[in-house]
Amino acid sequence: MRYHLNDPVYLQYYYYVRGLLSGDWGISPVSGQPVLDNLSAFFPATLELALFSIIIAAVLGIPMGVYAAVHQDKSIDHIVRLFSLGTYCAPPFLMALLLQLVFCYWLKIFPTGGRYDPFIQEPARITGFLILDSMLTGNFQALSAALVHIALPALSLALITFGLIARITRSSMLEVLRQDYVRTARSKGLPERLVIFKHALRNGMTSVVTVLALLFAFMLSGAIVIEYIFNWPGIGRYAVQSILALDLPSVMGTTLVFTVSIVVVNLLADIGYAALDPRIRLD
Amino acid sequence: MSLFDKSELRLTGRFLLKNKLSLAGGVIAASYLVLALLISLFGDRLLPYNPYVQNFAQTLLPPSPSHFFGTDDLGRDIFSRIVAGAPLDAQIAFIVVLVSLSLGGSLGAFAGYLGGHVEEVVMRVTDVFLSFPALVLAMAVAIAIGPGLNHSMMALLVVWWPWYARIARGEALTIKNSQYMEAAHAAGLKDIQVVIRHVLPNVLMPLLVYATLDISNVVLTGSVLSFIGLGAQPPTPEWGRMVFDGEDYLSTAWWMSILPALAIFIVVLAFSLFGDGLRDAFDPKLRRR
Amino acid sequence: MPSPLLSMHNVRLEFSTEQGIVHALRGIDLEVGRDEVIGLVGESGCGKTVLGLSILGLNPTPPARLLEGSRILFMGRDIAQLTRNELALVRGTGISMIFQEPATSLNPVYTIGDQITESIKLRIQRSEKTSSPSSSRIDEQVYEALRLVKIADPERVAHRYPHELSGGMKQRAMIAMALAAKPSMLVADEPTTALDVTIQAQILRLMRDLMNEVKASILFITHDLGVIAEIADRVAVMYAGRIVEESRVEELFEGPLHPYTQGLLASLPRLSDLGKEIQQLPGSVPDAIDPPQGCSFHPRCKFAMDHCRTIQPELKEVQPGRKVACHLY
């Protein structure tokens, strides 16, 4: 009776939404835990992983794209294009499994999974982000454990996505470098470095922001495969487990989180556009 | 620019030939398709081993001359399984893409051309679909209809058509406002005739180019669906599923999961390279170089 | 006679395109003296923009190629041979350029003030000043630069973005930016063509007034002979990638020497010609990929002689201060 399962569907829906708004997201029949608790435990882990990965991907991808655009049609350009296409085409599990194989099993540098070493005490939960918390509390043992665990999953995610970033950066920069104002900047006598990184890049970043937003949303929606392989306790893994266990409240909860995070990421992207391009601001 | 203009085709062909990587991709993709066709026609008779028969004396053997890709945890020859599984992803990918292209494309073309409420409704619906990553949506649908390879294909179908509708609508809008549409109207053609005779053929070209690239995406997403258990079920030798089966044995028998994953990679890469070259070939700006 | 500021000798530039090699500049000889405005006039397609860009090496160099033997001497130095970094040192503070379309030539994401500040900082960097001035001092100089181009409220405009200004204001801003680095020479590539006629007149007047205040020479590129008449001291006429006539403005208008110039002037509609037919030059601009042999104007020239078809005329001084490239002289 508690689950209103005998009530007509629309009533069930009504109770569900009411519950959502009051903080009751249902109980997972699998774990017996409230869904909201599970989500709030898992979401920061995914957020941390996504942030780490997108930063690595951007740091790898954007300079590569700029370099390829500046040296268009030379061999380095072709290499970059091929490389970025290759990494984009690789199925997500290939990268993750290869990394796991080489670095965890063969070289034994990194741990095979999980977010943290169960033998080291967790730092106090200030932000929910292990890396930040351990830095803030000065707990370097915890910090190194956290970093070591996040390395491979973040690297896998970054390697899959940086190719697309490089590609978009390259094509965007090619467009921009053709523009008249780049010619004007050169005519003023500015060093080429300044022309590219100050005048050209900022105009080219709009497309890049779009792709970054897209990828970040992708990462937030679990980067399901990566979390699964590395046993990362995030909402992606949670979603898969819930699906396989037919845990409906959890599935609905995670879907909700995905939706909201996508909306938020798009909002942030819009803010980013406005910050980059003054012509957009007045709207 | 009509797709079927002879000189266009010749120029495109010449361009494609010049781009060796695309050509390589095309060759590999074509070989893969031929292989898939052969397997689906002749079945297991072409394979060195039966992909389903289990042999507990031969479990987890590394690659060797007798088992090119080694054996899995149930003693089955992995090479045979990979080859046997070749048509599976191909079938799904082609069906999904073709259906999405025709249904989604037509819907989008109509919506874009007719405008007004029809366009609004179609666009809102596609917006809802497009705001989710394809995988998440496909997963949601797949849960609803249950596991299985055919079910995952249906899930992909449900999820995939909006992209084509979007593109088709965009192209239709451009065409709608172009001058020769006025000519068609002046000639007195009815709406339906206009769409069929003029809008669709011109929308078709960009859609085809997108579709070639899209095959890779479908294969990737489909294999991930199987990887998380929603698609192919054992003992079907679908490549994504094989990766999942082999994951537990990564440290002891890496060939079980890595090799099928590599197979997916090669096929996806081939289609992407070819599709890329195709897209560049049709891009009038790039042809100048 | 003081040495010229800029001296171009036998400058030849070609573009490789899919249709073939475009011979944009086919042996340009041109001199720009100190404190003078020299107009470069020609129809579209004659290569005058390419010429302007080639001085500062701004033609995109994969398709464009400067041929051997081309020399561009600026203050005695051959700047055609410089590396990109060395050339950058000449740009801005030595020679500056303003372009035809102010809307696309200004960076949309930075304020006018920011963009002018760049030029000012560059100038300060390159002069031997040891101390860099405070940012308020630089702001003052930015406002000064804007006042120079007769912008009424420089403080406000400096904080504006290009898209917030009108066409005329944008062009003024671009002139301010080009002059902020205090160059010795300014290349102006059709700066008024994209503007309304009334604004055109304003900008021309501004540039003429600026000549008195700023010690710089201007190479003014345009297709409009009327503009030349207003602003230039000397004029060079360009046809099919070569200079065909060069003289003082008054002398050119009173008595053009080259048949092409004569045709150009004759085709200008004048109020005194009301009721008469507009005279046209027969034929059309020659193909840049496959120009005619000999004198490139001979197919359209009513004075063409036999050897005009085979021998290309040199640009020679036929009267003091007047040069022509024609077999008639």
Image (cartoon, coloured by chain):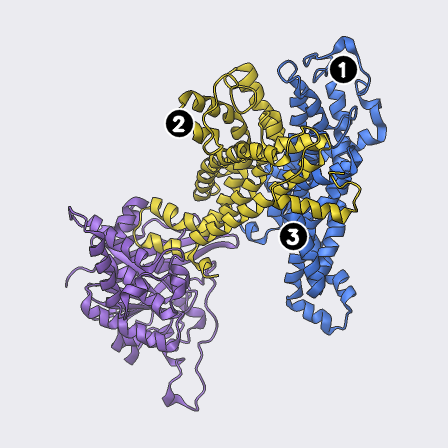
Chain colours: A yellow, B blue, C purple
Which sits in the foreground, B223 or C59?
Answer: B223
Residues flagged by tags 1 and 3 on a common chain = yes
Mark 2 belongs to chain: A
The numbered dot on residue A41 is none
Marker disc for residue B74: 1
Residue A9 point in image, percent of width and height: 77, 46
Residue at 43% across, 31% down: A132
Task: Kindly indicate the quadrant of the structure image that contains residue C326.
Answer: bottom left
* Res. B89 visible in picture: yes
- Going by the numbered disc 1, the residue's amino acid type is Leu
Disc 2 marks which amino acid?
Answer: Thr
Vertical arrangement, residue C261 with respect to residue C156, above or below: below
Q: Mark 3 points at which residue?
A: B127
Dot 2 crowding, Cα within 10 Å, few <14, some 14–19, many 20+: some
Q: How far apart are marks 2 and 3 (CA)?
A: 44 Å
**The quarter of the displayed image where residue C120 is located:** bottom left
Question: What amino acid is found at the position of numbered circle 3 in the picture?
Answer: Asp
Q: Which of marks 1 and 2 is in front?
A: 2
Relative placement, left or right, of C220 versus B161 is left
Residue at image position (63%, 41%) is: B17
Q: Which chain is mark 1 on? A: B
Q: Which residue is labeled 2 in the image?
A: A137
Kindly state the secondary structure of the residue where label 1 is placed: loop
Which chain hosts label 3?
A: B
Mark 3 element type: helix
Which tag is nearer the camera, tag 1 or tag 3?
3
Which x, y percent locates residue B74? Answer: 76, 15
Question: Could you tell whether C240 is left or right of C36 in the image?
Answer: right
Placement of the N terminus of chain B among the 4 image quadrants: bottom right
As helix, strand or loop, the secondary structure at mark 2 comes to loop
Q: Distance between the residues labelled 1 and 3?
A: 45 Å
